[in-house]
Image (spheres, rainbow, N blue to C red):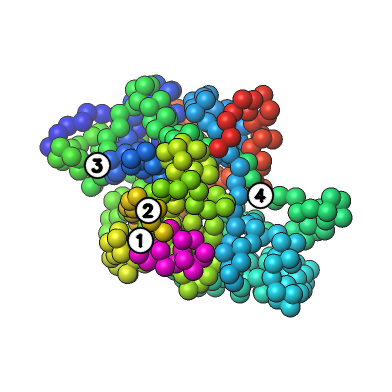
Amino acid sequence: MRDLGSVDALVLGGGPAGLGAAWTLAAGGARVLVVEREETVGGLCRTHAREGYRFDMGGHRFITADRDLLDRVVRLCGDDLLLAERSSEVALLGRRFRYPLEPLDLARKLPPGLALRALLSYLRGRLRPGPPVESFEDWASRRFGRVLYELFIGPYTEKLWGVSPAALSPEWAGQRISVPDLWAAARALFARGDAPARTHAKTFLYPRLGMGQLFERIAAAARSAGALLLTGSVPRAFERRGTRLNAALLETPEGPARVRTDTVLSTVPLPCLLDLALGPEAARELEGAFPFRPVRFLNIALDRPEALPTTWCYVGEGRLRAGRLQEPKKRSPHMAPPGRSSLMIELPHAPGDDIDRAGDADLLERARGELGALGVDLGDDVRFAFSVRAPEAYPVHLRGTPAARARALAALGRLENLRTFGRQGAFRFIFSDAALRMGIAAGEGFLAGRLPTNQDLARVQSAQRLTEVASVVGPTVLAGRERG
């Protein structure tokens, strides 16, 4: 077994949270080893490149209300950070609706009778006091009205997560979903006669060569400061003395290895960490409330200049398996060769189902049929297609998850030099900026000799109300930035 020596901090996982920790620790002079399962860093923010086409794993964009973090990212990326503008829609009932949903747009495009029912239902949901909100179904019905919930929100949510919205906790919803504001719509209508003011972050920053470029830069900065990154490797076991972990056994491309460490900062999936740190029996008592929803991304390179009218499109039709369509070139013109574009299709699925088992060629044929139903004809313009899997893409927040997570974090907290955080590690459906901030907070706490608790790290999140990036960065910083 190879001896990798001793480090101050062992970071498990090279995604946004793990890299944020390594970046901070190495800059502060700590000896750091990052262990990453994949061959490249970035986690769910990796960018895959083939023949001049580049594909992210999801609809990533960089926006944060944390000015210090934003300044650090701008300094790190320089001219490779572009200013882009989000445009998105929902495909439903053979029509396209703006997203986030806007009352006036819905009123114009829904059949008149359905539009009136949706409006009355929305008003009832917002104005009439109801019972306590206990599920995502309760939350969404209250904020969108029962008609819009049954028309789009409910079916789309069940397609995405694979369980009934009545079984989901509402804890993640306020961070991820923009709610239509009827009163803002009315003010906009009478003041300007146009669409309502935005309630979501439409302008954002985006790396020239995909979201993965940002995290490759962070990894390079960590390496330059002395951090070691070991890819294609996984932890297999911990050595423990009392309430402290003092070493980890790793599986690496060169075979088994051992590293001694003062602290373990983990971003690996919470069920995996429970098994490693507490043992299978203790893990089984806690991990049942922590399922993940896998997503398969079908990436299609096209020999045409444009694929969609918007950056991305949510597929509201429950009969279709696609969750969201995206055109990477709408974020940065460098995501495809000149004069060409591409399309990415997100396919949430269950482990072992037909989507999971299908080959790439079969997925492409299925995609052609579904795209045709949405009015998108690929014709003979497909140059190639390939898929990428994300087995732990979405932590599924069941109604029992918050309580189970509290128990799991408390149990892991009894190991005094172990911390867990990040989307998978804290089991929180968060944006990438929040994951990055979790890692930075863990690194800063270590350097100060006061590691935040697992619970404190899990509470780190994006701002409750998303902020337009221009209002945070300011015109001086954005001057001369190329628009994507």
Marks 2 & 3, CB-CB < 8 Å contact: no
| Region rendered in magenta | 365-378
Disc 2/disc 3 C-alpha distance (Å): 35 Å
Instruction: Check disc 2 and report the residue beneath it.
Output: 382
Alpha carbon separation for disc pair 3 and 4: 39 Å
- Residue 200 image label: 4
Q: CA distance from mark 3 to mark 1?
A: 31 Å
Q: Where residue 480 appears, x then y in whole percent?
A: 61, 25
In the image, residue 41 sits, relative to residue 88, either above or below, namely above
Earlier-in-chain disc, 1 versus 4: 4
What residue is pinned by disc 1? 364
Q: Is residue 93 above or below residue 175?
A: below
Which residue type carries mark 3? Ser
Viewport quadrant of the N terminus: top left
Q: Nearer the viewer, mark 2 or mark 4?
A: 2
CA gap between label 1 and label 4 equals 33 Å
- Disc 2 is placed on an element classified as strand
Identity of the residue drawn at 49% across and 69% down: 373
Residue on which the image places disc 3: 233
Q: Give the foreground label among 3 and 4.
A: 4
Could you say which is closer to the camera, residue 149 or residue 5?
Answer: 149
